[in-house]
Image: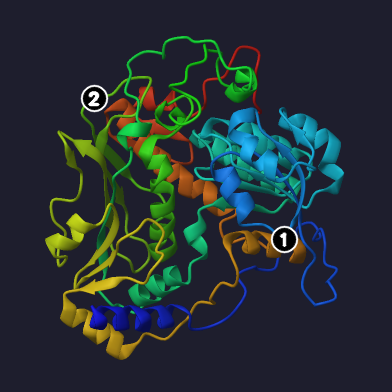
Amino acid sequence: MHALTTRRQALRSLALLGVGALARPSSRAEPTRTKPTAKNKPEPMRLAFIGVGGQGAANLRGLTGHQFVAFADVDDTMAAPVYRDYPDVPRFRDFRHLLDAHAGGLDGVVVSTPDHSHHPIARAIMQAGLNVYVEKPLATTIWECRDLAATARSHGVRTQLGVQGHHNGALRVLREWLDAGAIGPVRAVHLWTDRMQPVRYTASDALAPSETPPTTLDWDLWLADRPARPYSPLYVPNRWRNWWDFGTGPLGDIGAHMFDVVEFALEVGFPDLVEAETPWRNAFTAPPWSRVRWDFPARGTRPPLVIHWCNGTREGTFMRPDSVPHLPAEYIASATNGMAFVGDDGTAFIPDMRASSVPRIFPPEREADVLAQRPAPTLPRPKGTHFDDWFAAIRKGGVAGANFDYGAPLTEVVLLGQLAQRTGRPIRWDRAAMRAINNPEADALIRPALREGVTLAS
């Protein structure tokens, strides 16, 4: 145990080598605020929060010291702890009323609502000329992702997608080691997660039974622009993620984090083919387990790449890769979330979803060579948090590392896997035309189904 602890300390020190800012210069709008405080630190950001239960509350806790201007949430019960802790902050049920009242006094808006409402909320925020942070996944459909990226560009606002691992120093170490040939050319990546857990999983081939919504919830506002349907506690507050109308299943939930790691480390771009295996498919909920495969073409000097995903529980057994070259079986079995990059000469293994720690290299003798050579840092190390990266872009007129120009294509790749899950047929993707070749069922899912009378830009 002592030797393992010593090794981890050594690797962690490698991750911290180097300094530098992530923001890049931009010709877009001038920064919102630049005046320093007496201690030569930037002034606190003036923030509004839309969705303050669950992840929204966690985001608030991580941003104490900034100015909380206003809150909006459609569920008073979920929002109650935050409202209790911040009784003097103005609160709204309809986020549009918040924007009407406070848009002129905000540096940015943090959106932590269910997936299906990301697009209409973030779009309205940017149309008001405001900077926005949106939790992952960016949206539930490919069209919405592209529209959000285009809206951000047209309004010149600073954006950030909530893939918190994008700001990890260990992610830079992974990229540097792979670039230095630590495991040779990478030809496959294995990703796995235990989601969905049974307590948050609902399987159904029909709408949930109708119930009367509690008075503390504005059900119509919660639905946002989605088709009207009766309320059910099987949707709110915890199980919405597995219903296709509201969420993106485990793939959108955890896959967004893992594909961020893969894209940053390998610049995979877009796949030629995506295929999925599931126990069943229906129009309402994600399956309890799945295997998905993405085939990517060669990129420059990088060879073609295959990404394998598995999630969930099959006949009482947690889905993991059957085997991974070079990686001992006990490491696969020990990780509820795992990522393995397989090269010609070895495998880089990370036992989490965000590259929170530098990778183990297998076989051990290969790791010994890597540690002895200590590939030189080539990437600047981030300072502060993922939010600080967004704040720096706002203040300095730069670009956040996971802005929507990065986050929209990232989410699109993840959602292609979801289309394969939902249709049960291969997805051959024509990105320029935004269509699935020979899969009209998938084409029908590229845009969201909206309630009658709601229209979106073309």
How many numbered marks does the figure carry? 2
Say whether disc 1 or disc 2 marks the residue closer to the N-terminus.
Answer: 1
Q: Quadrant of the image for the C terminus?
A: top right
Mark 2 falls on what kind of element?
A: loop
Q: Residue at 66% of width from left, 57% of height from top? A: 63
Say if 316 sits above or below 309 in the image: above
Q: Which residue lies furthest to the bottom in this view?
A: 372
Residue 458 appears in the rendering: no
Residue 429 percent location from the top left of the image? 38, 39
Residue 40 appears in which quarter of the rendering?
Answer: bottom right
- Disc number at residue 280? 2
> Residue at (36%, 24%) from the top-left corner?
285
**Number of residues whose C-alpha sits closer than 10 Å to that of mark 1, classed few (under 14), some (14–19) or many (20 or more):** few
Label 2: few (<14), some or many (≥20) within 10 Å?
some
Locate residue 64, reporting x and y percent: 68, 58
The residue closer to the viewer here, 455 or 72, is 72
- Residue 77: tell me if it is visible: yes
- Distance Cα–Cα, label 1 vs label 2: 48 Å
Q: What element carries label 1?
A: loop
Q: Mark 1 points at which residue?
A: 65
User: Which amino acid is tagged 2?
Assistant: Trp
248 lies left or right of 290: right
Seen in the picture, residue 440 relative to 126 is either above or below; the reply is: above
Image coordinates of residue 39 in percent, x first then y, are 80, 77
Which residue is located at x 83 percent, y 72 percent? 36
